[in-house]
Image (spheres, rainbow, N blue to C red):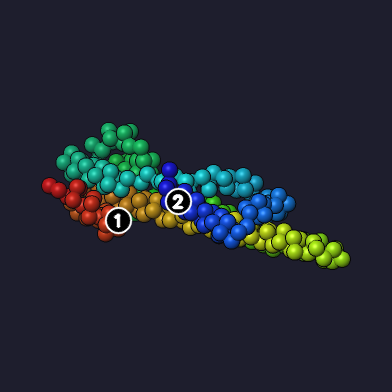
Amino acid sequence: MNLSTIIGLVGCFGMVLMGIMTGGNSVLTYVDIPSVLIVVAGSYFGLFTFGSMSDALGIFGTIGLTMKTPQLNEKGLITKLMSMSEKARREGLLALEEELEDLDDEFMKKGLRLVVDGTDAEVIRNLMETELNQMQERHVAKISVVNMWGTLAPGLGMLGTVIGLIGMLKNLEDKSALGPNMAVALITTLYGSMVANLMMIPWAGKLKSFDGAESRVKEMEIEGVLSIQAGDNPRILAMKLLSYLTPADRKSVEAEVLKD
């Protein structure tokens, strides 16, 4: 469970509710089913026009990823690559073959399989970078759908407001209903802003940060695989991989992997 997502979501809506209640208003005043249909359902169905049906249907799974914490395990990755580097220098590259089946990381396994097969380093780099690029493109496509929902929601909110205002103006003779009708008309704008700014835009930003972190790990793996093929000293390999980490993470991992 990604606590920062939960805290942010609860905190944002909590502050909105607190603002409503401290202003002396009832929360029920801001509940309007037609506005929900126009903003939430309307903007969602707009995604079907924006992309494919699978993109629109799959957005809920994409949003669900923001509730999870990616398990990247950089420390374990560096330790494993150092261990395989030591074995390759001691017993030769072919000795790595017996360890490949125990690897859970398919990306690294494919790269090391190419190393064991004697593939040229440039070919390995090109193949692994191509797979990395394809992963990033898939992520960008999914994030763009979340961003689009955040773009459509305020527009549908304004559309709902216009619909409400038209209905209000057609009944100007009823002066007592002008205020309530105006309030209802503006609720759709409120909903559109909340959907975009409290949910979709922050979620898209979090997914983008997840993509960056996963891409960085994949780049570490490419560097590690090529260093093993080149026969680099394990400590040199570790120093290369540690450079991908933030200074704070680097210190904690460095003390463990370079302790000997």
The residue shown at (68%, 58%) is 188
Mark closer to the chain start, 2 or 1: 2
Q: Nearer the viewer, mark 2 or mark 1?
A: 2
The residue shown at (78%, 64%) is 178
Instruction: Name the quadrant containing residue 46.
Output: bottom right
Residue 12: x and y, percent? 51, 56
In the displayed image of the protein, which residue is found farthest to the front? 24
3D distance between C-alphas at marks 2 and 1: 26 Å
Residue 177: x and y, percent? 79, 61
> Where's the N terminus, which quadrant?
top left
User: Seen in the image, is 227 located left or right of residue 72?
Assistant: left
Mark 1 burial class by Cα count in 10 Å: few <14, some 14-19, many 20+: some
Q: Is residue 146 visible?
A: yes
User: Looking at the image, do the residues carrying marks 2 and 1 touch, with CB atoms under 8 Å apart?
Assistant: no
Position of residue 208 relative to residue 178, above or below, is above
Residue 209: x and y, percent? 43, 56
Nearest the eye: 196 or 57: 196
**Residue 7, labelled with which disc?**
2
| Element type at mark 1 | loop
In the displayed image of the protein, which residue is found farthest to the left? 260
Residue 130: x and y, percent? 43, 52
Nearest the eye: 64 or 23: 23
Nearest the eye: 128 or 150: 150
**Residue 20, labelled with which disc?**
none
The residue shown at (18%, 43%) is 86
Q: Can residue 47 be seen in this view?
A: no
The amino acid type found where label 2 is placed reads Ile
The amino acid type found where label 1 is placed reads Leu
| Element type at mark 2 | helix
Residue carrying label 1: 245
The residue shown at (57%, 45%) is 60
